[in-house]
Image: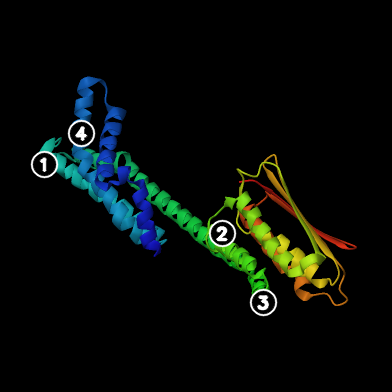
Amino acid sequence: MQCTYSILMMKNFYIANNRLLTHVLFWIAYLLTYTGMHAEGEDGMRVYFIGELERLPSAMLVAYVNLYLLYPGFFATKKYWQYVVSAVLLLFASSLLNRVFIEYFTEPLFQKGTTTPYEQVFIWYYIFKGMLWFLSPVLLFTLALRIFQRSYAQEQQHQALSREKLHAELNYLKAQVHPHFFFNTLNNLYALTLQASPSAPKVVLKLSELMSYMLYDAQQATVPLTKEIEHISNYLELEKIRYSKRLDVSLNVSGETAQCRIAPLLLIPLVENAFKHGVSNHTDNVWVTIDVKVKSDWLTVIVENSYEEQPVPNKEYRNGIGLQNVEKRLSLLYSNQHELIKKKEPGRYSVYMKIKII
């Protein structure tokens, strides 16, 4: 899988996604660069261009053997000494073949059978000069290119895995929202249908809207803030039916909310927490207030509810599972751009959340 991913990443380096075109343009750039480095005047330009054409086969041999044999066979597998020895042998063989090609076919400097020992030294000089001056840069460039490609592919793979992990974790956290609420609502709906209550159709409608939001809208990375507020409003309508007249609840919204977007299902756990661990533990009149405010690219949400200390603290409440869920999502989605404060006072429990608007 990793090999396949690396190959796909390498395609990003091709010009217009065309491998052949990329290689042709590279060798044209190579010829022009080396010609321009050495040529002087129009005649010099022509002479050096022909010279570079003569050396081109040996340069291509070094490039492609290094790219497709030496690098994957030795360097990528951390066999560095084997790579160095093989690279030196490749440079020597390529330069030697180039010298032989020039001597026998294109521009012989030393005539066969008349070469003196002094001139033979110059033959080796040209071979080593070709290795160091003309072919070594090609080897080093292709090596650096492969290292960069590999590093880039690994970084892209790491980012892809991080995104997949983040997506899976966020989906898991979102999946924890609402299950107990839906269970309670279905029980209430069952009781209403037994009583043939006129509120039953309203409960079905609101429950349908809640589920529609969770199944469709909440699958997006962000949703309009107005949608999230509407979701909270539907939730409150069902809770009003459940608690009847003993519940006093208010939802206050201020600021320019129309153009704001937030992560879905981020606010509802704050409201759920108020009902599950505050309101549901009371037998007398209870209250919940929710204030949503947008100002200067910041969203502030304050949820307060009536609260009484229980003789035997609820373990789930003490652990704050719903709010822990929110904290994890905030750290994943709004790193260094959020604030969450929980405060418990006599008769009151409040949660303050502030996030940077996307």
Question: As shown in the figure, which amino acid type bears the numbered disc 1?
Answer: Tyr
Q: Position of residue 312 (x, y in %)?
A: 85, 77
Q: Earlier in the sequence, mark 2 or mark 4?
A: 4
Contact check, label 3 and label 4, Cβ < 8 Å: no
The x and y percentages for residue 357 are 64, 46
Q: What is the secondary structure assignment of the residue under circle 4?
A: helix
Residue type marked 2: Ala
Q: How many marks?
A: 4
Residue depth check, mark 2 versus mark 3: number of the one nearer the observer: 3
- Label 3: element kind: helix
Earlier-in-chain disc, 1 versus 2: 1
Label ID, residue 187: 3
Instruction: Judge whether residue 104 can be spotted in this image.
Output: yes
Q: Residue at x 28, y 46 (%)?
A: 18
Residue 104 is labelled as 1
- The residue that disc 2 covers is 218
**Considering only order in the chain, which callout, 3 or 1, is on the residue closer to the N terminus?**
1
In this view, the mark in front (4 or 1): 4
- Mark 4 and mark 1: span between their CA atoms? 15 Å
Q: Nearer the viewer, mark 3 or mark 4?
A: 3
Q: Residue furthest bottom?
A: 194
Dot 3 amino acid type: Asn
Comparing 54 with 304, the one in front is 304
Residue position marked by numbered label 4 in the rendering:
51
Which of the pair 66/340 is nearer the observer? 340
The amino acid beneath tag 4 is Gly
Q: Residues within 10 Å of mark 2 (few under 14, many from 20)?
A: many
The crowding category of the residue bearing disc 4, from other C-alpha atoms within 10 Å (few below 14, some 14 to 19, many at least 20), is: some
Nearest-to-viewer mark from 2 and 4: 2
